[in-house]
Amino acid sequence: MQTKLQQITVLGATGSIGVSTLDVIARHPDRYQVFALTADRRWQLLAIQCLTHKPRYAVLNDPAGVLELERELRLQGCNTEVLQGVSALEMVASHEGVDTVMAAIVGAAGLIPTLAAVNAGKKVLLANKEALVMAGGLFTRAVAECGAVLLPIDSEHNAIYQCLPNHRPDYLAAGLDSCGVRKILLTASGGPFRNTPIKELSLVTPEQACAHPNWSMGQKISVDSATMLNKGLELIEACWLFNTRPQQVEVVIHPQSVIHSMVEYIDGSVLAQLGNPDMRTPIAHALAWPERIESGVSSLDLISISRLDFSAPDYDRFPCLRLAQSAAEVSGTAPTLLNASNEVAVAAFLQRKIRFDQIAVVIDHVLSRMTSSEPKCLEQIHSADTEARALARQLIATW
Ligand code: NDP
């Protein structure tokens, strides 16, 4: 029987993952209590979430919205304390009153608060894959040294986690070979442009790129899915999470998004995790781990799905996937450069400053001009990130 309510901080509460997390939490008031909610600038939605979940703290990144949020909460009789900025994000991620942190800020902005949760030894539910991609070595070392528990939220990594043996520390220390794993099969839907003629990709609009056929997600990850850079970020994420090599991760196109990924063992067994494409499943799995709780996701109807298809990725159509694979193989700061240049390119595409097919050109430009080094500290990662962003912006400014 549960005795103490688990105190949860949701970083990025107003996003797609944040909203799904609050949906699962609300189904289990006997288990979970919201400690803090955070957002970048959407203070109106954050206010509604505060009125529903009554957290101790709400953090907004945008100074302009803080007064509005504060005024709205007081007007409605809610006494949630309103804070602003990165140090407040770090505080609510590492506070001694917090048990679990959902890391669901999008992009590099999530790194510092997520690391604060790791350094404080929290149970960290990791959606913010960019944090692990840009600083994997430092991040996983901090997890080990600080006794944090890291559980993957990305549906693929959560699936892999569920298909791996329970004696997790074995593979963390000795690699996947040590527990008889031959390879990871990382499934990918192929996104909205899986069958679009390649020459038409230059005409793709942000609206088309964000209309994912199977998943409802934030804009940045939707564009990443459309270029398949997302699968490349996931490959790098898998290498850090499961202590494996890029060559041991095979990307398989599976358009139905029913199998969320698989693990093949040396005896020929392949274990898969299946479910409807709804992020509440991995969120509920990680929240309750090692127990199971109801998530609100409907039962998988295999008879109506009736068939599952698989194919190899087409690298001419998805050059970003190849670029990410190369960055994974080079390692060091190469994934940091990949992530930074992609964030700049995706933002420019969403602002209609560059074409969809130019995202890969920006990343390639940065990766081919900057040298990867082995980062020893966070400052080195930040300076690689800053330099890559500047180079990407310089190129875009010439178009
Ligand atoms: P969204 O864009 O929907 O939400 C992002 C959240 O982060 C929002 O709460 C946003 O606030 C906040 N945020 C954005 N920028 C900053 C900043 N500079 N400082 C502080 N907070 C910020 O993203 P998703 O929920 O789709 O994705 C979140 C993370 O989870 C990403 O790393 C993504 O790759 C990963 N992920 C997402 C999946 C999905 O299904 N959506 C699946 C697997 C992984 P505001 O609302 O105010 O802008």
Image (cartoon, rainbow, N blue to C red):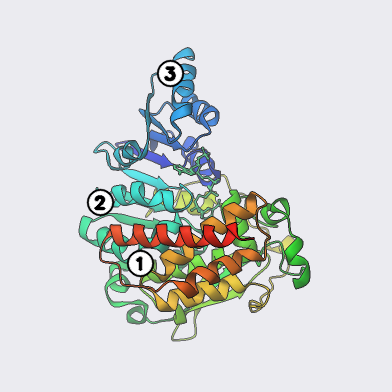
Task: Name the residue tied to disc 2.
Answer: 119
Q: Quadrant of the N terminus?
A: top left
Give x and y (percent) for residue 161.
43, 65
Residue type at mark 2: give it. Asn
Give x and y (percent) for residue 324.
51, 72
Q: What is the CA distance from the residue labelled 2 to the residue labelled 3?
A: 31 Å
Task: Name the residue tied to disc 1.
Answer: 166
Residue type at mark 1: give it. Asn
Q: In this view, does 391 lie above or below 374?
A: above
SS class of the residue under badge 2? helix
Closer mark to the observer between disc 1 and disc 3:
3
For residue 222, what is the image quadrant? bottom right
The tag earlier along the polypeptide, 1 or 2, is 2
The tag earlier along the polypeptide, 2 or 3, is 3
SS class of the residue under badge 3? loop
Q: What is the CA distance from the residue labelled 1 to the residue labelled 3?
A: 43 Å
Q: Which mark is residue 78?
A: 3
The tag earlier along the polypeptide, 1 or 3, is 3
Residue type at mark 3: give it. Cys
Residue 32 can be seen, yes or no: yes
